[in-house]
Amino acid sequence: MKKVYVTRRIPQKALDLIEAECRLEVNPHDRVLSSEELAAAVGDAEGLLCLLTDHIDASLLDQAPRLKVVANCAVGYDNIDVQACTERKVAVSNTPGVLTETTADMAWALLMAAARRVVEADRYVREGKFKAWEPMLFLGEEVNNKVLGLVGMGRIAAAMARRAAGFNMTVFYYDATRKSPEEEQDLGVEYRNLEDLLQEADYISLHVPLNDQTRHMIGERELKLMKDTAYLVNTSRGPVIDEAALVRALKNNKPAGAALDVYEHEPELAPGLAELENVTLAPHIASATVQTRTRMAVMAAENLLAGLKGEKMPNLVNKELEL
Ligand code: GLV
């Protein structure tokens, strides 16, 4: 039986699928493995089911000569050196589609929480400060009828545009690849270049994958372009924002606020970030519902098993290997 290593306990349904066909080993610790521990664990494995907290690089692959498949239990796969995998004929898969609506729900929750100061207000009530209704208490910003700027126009951004329609918002998007006029019309979105989008949007939500083009896409210059009243939401990957620059900008309330689910040096926060009142912080949980995490794990397991059997992997990333 082929050995499959799973780097963290994941929903049982996925583990059962793997165990029915393979020799399954799961990281017994309730923490991320060090690179040495991971290398030792996959040294004799044919399959690896990993998470975005695992770094799959050339050095690890060289210590795992039998490895055929790396199934990432995430839609983003910037934690994997795909080229190094391709060079070694190791198939890589991800989990697109199954977390789209869930992630958009969370991005929307963060947007609303930031605009209406929900977390600050919660703290205020818990601290016993709520004495009476007040005409000027916790005034936030409108969301309805405002302008939403989507950076990236993939599946999750499209789900954001659908939500924005219910709030009567105008939706602009920027993407390296422009959609056709028909697609734009279907999505209810208008194209803007990045500068114009940053200058015109009241809410800016990031939905790009992390790569060399998107790393620090939002830095000091871009933050300065935003309206003073704008809010920035990030549920994509932390390094898309220069987080130190964001802290400096938020200290001056320009832009007005941010809501983040991801961080540049996760799980570390940029110095000063946690001290700011105008930022809402979540611990990378945009896809974290029982249903979605189960779907993601099952999808990763199915890809893994297909790859190990030499069958077509439904969500193969390095498609060159299919030829
Ligand atoms: C989560 O961040 C994912 O990429 O699935």
Image (cartoon, rainbow, N blue to C red):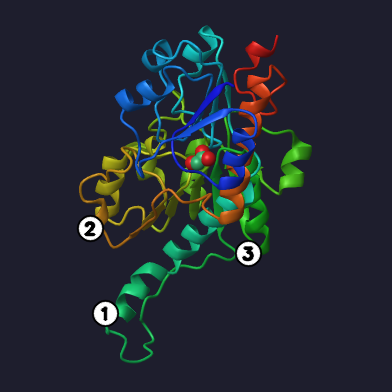
Q: Within 10 Å of the Cα at label 1, are there few (<14), some (14-19), or many (20+) other Cα atoms?
A: few
Residue located 33% across and 53% down the image: 254
Residue 297 in percent (x, y) is at: 58, 41
CB atoms at circles 2 and 3 under 8 Å apart? no
Q: Which mark is residue 127?
A: 1
Q: CA distance from mark 2 to mark 3?
A: 31 Å
Q: Nearer the viewer, mark 2 or mark 3?
A: 2
Residue 79 - label: none
Q: Can you identify the residue that label 3 sits on?
A: 167
| Residue at (39, 51) in percent of width and height | 283
Q: Residue at x 70, y 28 (%)?
A: 314
Q: How many marks?
A: 3
Q: Circle 1 — which element? A: loop
Label 2 belongs to which residue? 275
Q: CA distance from mark 3 to mark 1?
A: 32 Å
Q: Is residue 196 visible?
A: no
Asked where in the image residue 59 lies, by quadrant, the reply is top left
Of residues 322 and 25, which is closer to you in this image? Answer: 25
Q: Is residue 170 left or right of residue 47?
A: right
Q: Amino acid at mark 3?
A: Phe
